[in-house]
Amino acid sequence: MADALHEPQLALHVEDLTVSYQNKPVLWDIDLDLPPGVMAAVVGPNGAGKTSLIKAILELIPSLAGHVRILGKPYRQQRGRVGYVPQRSAVDWEFPTTALDVVTMGLYGRLGWLRRPGRREREEAMQALEQVAMADFAHRQISQLSGGQQQRVFLARALVQQAEVYFLDEPMAGVDATTERAIVNILGELRDAGKTIIVVHHDLQTVRTYFDWLVLLNVGVVAQGPVSEVYTAANLRRAYGGQVALLEGNGMPADKPTPPDPQRDQTGDVF
Amino acid sequence: MLTLFVDYTIAKVTIGAVLLGIISGVLGSFAVLRQQSLLGDTLSHAALPGVCIGFIIAGTREMASLMAGALATGILAALAVLVITRRSRLKTDAALGITLSVSFAIGVVLLTYIQGTGNASQGGLDSFLFGQAAAILRHDLWIMAGITFAALALVTALWKEFKLVVFDPSFAAAMGLPVVALETLLTVMIALAVIVGLQMVGVVLMASMVIAPATAARQWHERLGPMVVSAAAIGVTAGVVGALISAQGQGLATGPLIVLCAAVLVAISLLFAPRRGLVEEAVERWRGRRQLEDRQVLSTLYGLARRHQDPRFSAERGFVDAYYGVRTRKALEALHAQGLVDRFRAEPDEAEYWELTEAGVEEAERLLADIKGRRA
Amino acid sequence: MLASLMERIPVMIMVTGALVGMAGTLVGSFLVLSGRSMLSDAISHSIILGIVVVWLLTGQQTGPIQTIGAAVTGLLTVFLTQALVRTRRMRNDAAIGLVFPVFFALGVLLLNVYARDVHIDEHTVLLGEIGFIWLDNITIAGYELPRSLVAMSAITLVNLLFVGVFYKELKLATFDPMLARALGFAPGVLSYGLLLLTSVTAVAAFDAVGVILFVAFVIVPPATAYLLTERLWLMLVIGCLVSVIASVTGYILANYWDVSIGGMMAVMTGVAFTLAFLLAPRHGLLPRWWRARRDAAHNRAAIDDSAEAKRPS
């Protein structure tokens, strides 16, 4: 029973996932269904549990209840088909190693214990670096890369994993516009190749241009589905509470950048 | 005659312990809150070369010069830590470890150098390693008292400035306070606490006197003022009890005894302090976890009922279990006891069915509104 | 006969010192990189309790089983420290500073009570006796070798094997523990393995350098190497080289000035660090300062040039 496929037609199936920190629920009763081949944004205000959601799905933090299926099976059985890009700030970029080496780390899962990466792995890593236009920086020490370049290295590391489902935690945070566009293009190519991309995203403005699927999160799932259906003023208001006032033009989500607003400073973290 | 001698020793040791407890408790509070707990460890190890240099310069085991030496090398060590963290890619932990071990090594080299010169009065320099309270002279106590009261006077005079620097250095800087100078002053005063502790606990265990009283005191107080006073009191208690046991003359080193007394006080505070105590927390957490489970099961039942458009929809327990992946029996019983759910058995299959009572529906709705409220 | 022995003793002392540094570097590099250097301080202080307890129980202070038994206290310190941090009542550094003094204090008191006239006295605890390791010899394959030298050779080999075999896993777990976990490499288990070896190394090195100087051998060579290279494997190699150089120069200077050999070796690691801190090509203080000055001059020249160009002729 446990090994039988459960919701195999879904890339990601989460049922009743609850995570609590001490006695405070961080994620409450999450039900999520993601079809394969979508590029999904997980969006919500600060403290909505976006990062926790990914970490709980990947069993990096314990959950109180619920279960997760990735392509029909628990994560432990699907490690090889899942790629994960943590927040850039999660690692120490002063670590003495090169960009190429960091990308090679993405292949460690496939290598398993004890086997060393060899020429073949390095070539694969090099290809991934080329894909993100970072081949020239392969032998640079990672602390000498800019924030955007570091993020591309992280993306290349995910690419070599050749996964089917990708989880990316804020890949567009603090990167330059060129890198952001490059990242979106690469993710789009992956999606077109049938992969499923799940991105924790912080910028509501770009949701509709970048993504085709949207999960609005705030401790619980506020709404989920195709962006065209879910990205409505009502849903956003439910997710962001009062802060959404900033978004609205005339009752509908603004598609232009919002004009400067005195309230913006107080709730600036939304954007 | 003997009793007089013992009483005199005990009086000296007690006074020394009181002074040490006060200064290390007060300054330790600042150090711990500034996340510089281990700076005391580094500064105390760095006192060893200072003591040796003081001895070499003075030529005798004269406290004032030994302390001056210890203060000087302590300040140098603090400077070294600062420079290494600011001017290299190494982080604080490495800077502390490097400074601690290398300055202690210099101390060891100097110690053996002094032994090699055969200076007759060198005997007793190693007592600074573990402390030897009974060897304190009356004259030393005057110096220790002077330092302690000077430090206390400074802390009192600059109380609100220090407080601000500890809690919010950038705000303090915005207010126009000389943050760097104040932080330096706090660090120098930790070096002062270390030299007061030289003879009582020795250089190796001084770290504990900086951290333990402050950590214990933090358990009982949420405000800086009372915390500092308590830290001093805890430091004094540990110091006096430890020093008195040591002074019984069983050959037990003073430093370790004081440290163990402080550790006992920390353990008590950690476990039993109101609000922050671990015992209370464990009880609370157990209760909260049960409640959270209960609430979860309740909201699941509610969700099922909503999906079936029937507020009194009854669910089989096995189904709820499967839905959850956990056993829900306990939670259902607890909800039942609160009158939020009802149980009944359907005859043919002996299965257990549960449904929400009216109170249960209300509670579930309140709960979900609550979670939504958190979002706003 | 006597002459050849006298010749061998300095070599043995230097080799032992170098081995302490190399074994220390192999584990210490990962501690420095993961920001846990001070755990080496905590571990080395704590093992004194283990050594005394093992000695009281078995009457033995050395031997593989005794070494591992004593090393367990080091691991226990780490475990207790982490338990305290998990209570969220204190930060990591405060927890470290609370736990190890207790272990150390218990060890010293037990020594006070039971061991007043054995050779593990307070002095050995702190300073070690690397100059006298040749007093305690064992015979291996017909050669009489100092016990410390043999013990340190063994543990250096074990550490080398551990780092060699798990190099890739250790690198990933140190750089990105989250990904390591997501990929199914158990970074927690690896980290405890590393800390166990740190403890065992500390116990093995105890006779030679004592518990505090040990910290210098674990932290300072890797920290020095970290300033000199951008490659992890090179960092390990350079750290080992620094250890060898510090041992040799430390021994020579200690003899010259007639001071503690272990102390002088540790001081020399500090000298190596200071040199790297000041002069390392990329990260050194002086090269950086010089580059900044050159760039500033360059910029100034550029500004002057453009001002020159704008001036109407």
Image (cartoon, rainbow, N blue to C red):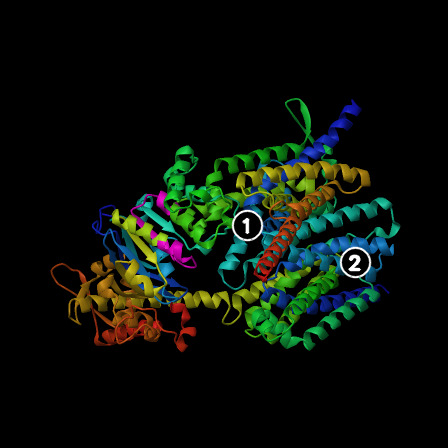
| Direction from residue B287 to residue B273 in the image, left or right | right
Circle 2 sits in a helix, a strand or a loop, which is it?
helix
Residue A211 vs residue C179, the one in the foreground: A211
| Direction from residue B200 to residue A45 in the image, left or right | left
Up-down: is B335 above or below A128?
Answer: below
Q: Could you classify mark 1 by the number of other residues whose Cα lies within 10 Å: few (under 14), some (14-19), or many (20 or more)?
A: some
Determine which quarter of the picture holds residue B223: bottom right
Q: Amino acid at mark 2?
A: Gly
Determine which quarter of the picture holds residue B242: bottom right
Horizontal and vertical percent for residue B273? 53, 70
Residue at horizontal 85 percent and vertical 55 percent from the top: B57
Horizontal and vertical percent for residue B77? 70, 56
Q: Amino acid at mark 1?
A: Leu
Determine which quarter of the picture holds residue A62: bottom left
Farthest front residue in view: C313
The quarter of the image holding the C terminus of chain C is bottom right
**For the residues carrying marks 1 and 2, which lies nearer the camera in this image?**
2
Q: Chain of mark 1?
A: C
Residue at horizontal 66 percent and vertical 36 percent from the top: C244
Q: Could you classify mark 2 by the number of other residues whose Cα lies within 10 Å: few (under 14), some (14-19), or many (20 or more)?
A: many
Horizontal and vertical percent for residue B306? 19, 69
Q: Which residue is mark 1?
A: C76
Q: Is residue C174 visible?
A: yes
Q: Chain of mark 2?
A: B
> Which residues fall within the magenta stretch?
A157-181
Q: Which residue is mark 2?
A: B69
The quarter of the image holding the N terminus of chain C is top right
Q: How many numbered marks, from 0 up?
A: 2
Residue C172 vs residue B256, the one in the foreground: C172
